Image (spheres, helix red, strand yellow):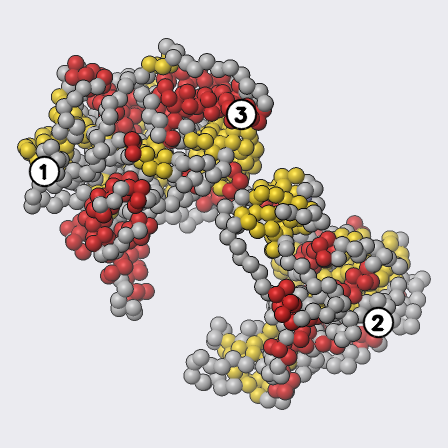
Amino acid sequence: MLYIKCPYCGLRAQKEFSYGGDATVKRPNINEEVSSEDWDNFVYMRKSPRGKHIELWQHIAGCRQWIKVQRDTATHEIFQTAKVTEEIR
Amino acid sequence: MSQPFRLNKEGLINRNKKISFTFNGKKLFGYEGDTIASALIANGIHLVGRSFKYHRPRGFFGAGVEEPNAKLQVEFNGHSEPNVNATEMELVEGLSATSQNCWPSVNFDVGAINNFLKMFFPAGFYYKTFMWPKSFWYKIYEPFIRKAAGLGVASIEKDKERYEHKFEYCDLLVTGSGPSGLASAYAAAKNGAKVILAEDKPRFGGTLLTDDVSIDNLSGKDWAEKIISELKSMPNVTVKNRSQVFGYYDHNMLVMFERVSDHLEKKSKFTPRQRLWYIRAKETILSTGSIERPIVFGNNDTPGIFLSAAAKEYMKVYGVLVGKKPLIFTNNDSAYETALEFKKNNVEPIILDTREEHSSELIDEAKSKGIDIRFSHGVIVANGYKKVKSAKIGKLNKDKNSFEKIETVDCDCICVSGFWTPSVHLASQSGNKLKYEEKIDAFIPDKKKQHETSVGAANGSFTLEESLKHGFENGSNLSAKITETKKEISIPNVNEKKYGAHDKFWCMPLPKNENPKRFVDFQNDVSVSDIEIALREGYRSIEHVKRYTTLGMATDQGRTSNLNGLQLVSNIENKIVPEVGHTTFRPPFTPITIGTIVGREVGMEYMPTRKTPMHEWHEKNNAVFVDAGAWKRPRYYKQGSETLFEASKREAKNVRENVGICDVTTLGKIDIKGPDVAEFLNRVYTNAWMKLPVGKARYGLMLREDGIVMDDGTTTRISENHYHMTTTTAQAANVLSHLEYYLQIVWPELNVNVVSTTEQWAGAAIAGPKSREMLSKLYPDLDVSNEALPFMGYKESEFFGVPSRIFRISFSGELAYEINVKSDHGMFMWEKMMEVGKEFGNQPYGTEALSTLRIEMGHVAGPELDGRTIPSDVSLNGLVSKKKDFIGKNSLGREAFNVESRQKIVGLIPIDRKSSIPEGSHIVQDQNAKLPNPKLGHVSSSCWSVENNNPFSLAIMKDGKNMIGKKFFAVSPLKNKSIEVEVISSHYVDPEGKRVRS
Ligand SMILES: [Zn+2]
């Protein structure tokens, strides 16, 4: 079971979180024209890297904040967590 | 009642307390502190089971977790448990053990015929034999394999025992209380670290209990006792025996299995049987020790053949002799300690040492005591069927591939030692890659992957001095990093015997024309020739060899067989062991009970039960409940001997004719506040929200970004910047997360806050033509006319003195209202409604009637919004704005969403107007067509239309409305039904929606 550091609450067990996918995907702006290709990329196309991956988790059984987690998809090592307003590099 | 193999005083058992038990029906006794194994051996019993494949007689081989053979069916405390390791289970009064995998008895087993047919059971036997003919599989092969493969018998009784889970956090977890574990725990505890020390066995000390050593002039056992009692007195230390750390998971999470009370004669009602510990440790010391491996020889599975260290443990811990005429067969010095222990107890052993004549401290001591030592010797084959009687032994030539001399010697046991294998399972599970250590011919941990540090024998250090030093140092250094305190600890003086080098020899050759079975894996009956066959047939990867031969795949996980298997493969393949590699270690290290995994999450505690504030009233009024997620909802209120069908028809009819009330508390409720709510809703819902006035509700449809309908519900504007959203019961949690996602991540610039208020409000729907009359009696001072409170209107008013919210919304398609009061007032509201509603013929209705009402109105719900439908599929395209943007809008233009033949919602009625159509039925043109019969759609919801008094269903069907008027078959192979149906509109009742506005 992963041990995830919520930037608001501290280290908590994985049980308290739910997974939310790739955090680097940006939704096209509302009310703006978007090409079919860009839209399809946003809705469907996801990378499935082996290794470092920046992803979203929500602390559903805690503060309910969505957070960013940089995790190794092969080893589950977590390098960094951050608020969604912060950058992970 | 004498015990012929019990020593007079040796051992750590309590000779003042006799314990009686039975084995295969025979009454026996042992002592407190015995295992089933030690008590049976004391009684001279060695034949305990039959082997898995050939049903060969099997006896004890080890004295602990390494045991591959002695798995018994054990009954105690009123329950029966299969596959219990006799070498681990402690003896308790009244216990009854029986042999497994034998019929009719362990002494005469019909399956033993397999042993004489062994040429038919080579490696890959099951794969090869049972592949054809295919039709034989279910009826003949599978039942045969099941019967033959069965070990113990699982109980079919309900487990009455209590099991627990516990979550724990510590600075240092130490797994194993041998010398290195004790040293690590002690050093860390002195530094003030929070320490958990776990020992699998009942007694602490590991090899200190059996090795002839001294530490600071104390015997190993006394030193261990001293350290343990000091650790127990420290508040920062938890010391646990009978507790096995069996799994190393991500982020330093380790799982431990504690046997709390099986060894107790009496326990309180609340004492659990077993406890599962989830331990999050900052650092872990893996001091799991090592396990002796055997040397492979002919008929090496005969009862009476033991690992040499096990024989010593039986003498030193249990005061039991495994035999009185022992042969010690070894390639190293450690078995000499066993020989010396026999000698001490006046038993004369013969040592067969595969090494050439040489000298070491132990060899010299054995010589000086007059022990018969034969160098360059080994056991070729054991003689005896149910017990060793003699052994054919041979003097090896220089190359150790043939014999210079062969003779037969009498013996009643053979104690074998092929050197030591570090227990690296936890290190490997942590992600550590392991490396091959040539010096000890075994794998040891390599570079750390998590916070695990292996010490002592688990790390390949086989001397006490090194183990203690390594333990103290690592315990001290690892804890000092955490506590920032470092206390000086003096490393004690150690007195131990020095071992000479071992012989890299692991399998005895066979003389010409002799071909006895030489087992590598006892539990799965894998012999040398099976591995040879696998290699001959082209299997190369060790993982494939393992699966093909089943080597190491039994419950003992190959603890005594893996390395010998690897050596064999590497020899045949002419590779070195590290090139062959090792198979993966997986938790649990030893089998654990299902009860422990489940813990307290059984019966009522399986999941939380959510009850509405009116639950007790429903119970008192014969509600039959249905689970809606964790919620309990009344499905119908049973009157007399009514069936579900009759009751729901009565309730639905009463709503259509008079008035009914329904508990709708379970609907998701989300309170939304902020100046930008209208803009937010406008993006979240498909329809327009910018102009919703205060005091009005609106129905809204929510999509996912891929255009699929996510949820529907109403949102009401309570005041300028305050809205109240409802969701379906099932989607409540998802919708909240969805809103939070957009507010926190996508549009943080919107000033909007959302919070779930599902639990805060109790809700009741009042539906039916008489609902307005009833409402006016509930709110005598309020104008509830159609003009003052129109469809989709909202008002706040006191309900007999308590604050309430009135929504004029309808799910049933009737004139209807929904009243919300604070949860605490829910019961009051409900009882008041029942009282006031009497004169209007009000009756409560459950979810079944609710479904009937919505289905015949053509209102979609979960079965239609099934994660595959877009708004136009379910006739909701009127709610999709063409002017504004919203979540999922761009996806609606996709080509596949706009083809004419797309499956869309329709209504179905049976031609005979009588046969109800099973939900899930497939719609086909021709019920007798050849399979696969093209599927035109499926039935999503079915009901008995109370309005028209015949069955009616909603279906999602190809070409949708173009099919209206045509006839098809609704086929349900599950219910074995085929019903001819006619396609009609999905709006079966009040298609114009006049009633809700009346
Ligand atoms: Zn949090």
Whole-Å distance between the Cαs marked 3 and 2? 70 Å
> Residue B822: in sight, yes or no?
yes
Q: Residue at x 47, y 25 (%)?
A: B474
Q: Are marks 3 and 1 on the same chain?
A: yes
Which mark, by number, is residue B402?
Answer: 1
Farthest residue, direction bottom = B965
Secondary structure at numbered mark 3:
helix
- Ligand 1 rendered quadrant: top right
* Residue occupied by mark 3: B479
Q: Is residue A76 above or below residue B813?
A: above
Query: Which residue is at the front of the view, B495 or B144?
Result: B495
The image quadrant of residue B75 is top left
Task: Give the percent coordinates (x, y) of residue B158.
Answer: 46, 47
Mark 3: amino acid: Ser
| Tags 3 and 2 touching, CB below 8 Å | no
| Chain at tag 1 | B
Image quarter of the N terminus of chain A: top right
Please give the chain letter of the residue carrying mark 2: B
Q: Position of residue B510 (x, y in %)?
A: 12, 41
Q: To which residue does mark 2 refer?
A: B791
Residue A40 rendering spot, x and y as whole percentages: 62, 68
For the question of whether residue B777 can be seen, the reply is: no
Position of residue B497 in the picture relative to residue B843 (left or right): left
Q: Residues within 10 Å of mark 2 (few under 14, many from 20)?
A: many
